[in-house]
Amino acid sequence: MEVDQSEAAAAPEVSDPAAPAPIEVPDTGEPGVDEVLAGLWALADTPLAEHPAIYEAVQRGLAEQLSGAPPPRASNPEPPTGLG
C-alpha cells in the first residue's frame, strides 16, 4: 500500500513533548525591571551549571532597580574617605 505524500505533508507537526512551553511575560511598566527580567530568557540556552549566576545577576539587578540605587561603578572601587 502506497502512502499519499500529500497526506503525509498535510499531517500536523507534533511538537517535542520535552520542549518547554512558551511563556508570555507581560511588561511590568518599569523598563529597567523589564530589562533585568529579560536576562531570565538566557536560561533556556545556558547550561544548568551556569543558572545560579544568571539568577544572582537578575536578583541583584532587581534589587538595584527596585531600590532606586544606581548600579555600582567599577571605575571607582575605592570607598569614599572622610566619612568618619
Image: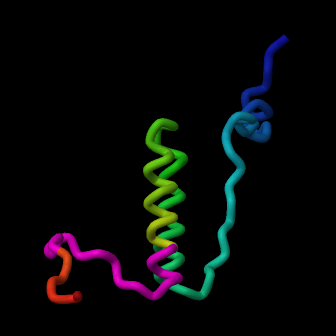
Quarter-of-image position of residue 26? bottom right
The residue positioned farthest toward the right in the image shown: 1
* Residue 54 or residue 77, whichever sits in front: 77
Residue 77 in percent (x, y) is at 17, 70
The answer to whether residue 73 is magenta is: yes
Residue 33 in percent (x, y) is at 52, 78
Residue 2 in percent (x, y) is at 80, 15
Q: How many marks?
A: 0
Task: Quadrant for the N terminus, please.
Answer: top right
- Residue visible at 78% across and 41% down? 12
* Residue 52 or residue 18, whichever sits in front: 52
Task: Quadrant for the C terminus, please.
Answer: bottom left
- Residue visible at 34% across and 77% down? 71
- Residue visible at 16% across and 88% down? 82
The answer to whether residue 72 is magenta is: yes
* Residue 3 or residue 39, whichever sits in front: 39
Rendered position, 26 above or below 24: below
Left or right of 1, for residue 23: left
Residue segment shown in magenta: 63-78
Q: Of helix, strand and loop, which mostly describes the magenta segment?
A: loop
Rendered position, 7 above or below 24: above
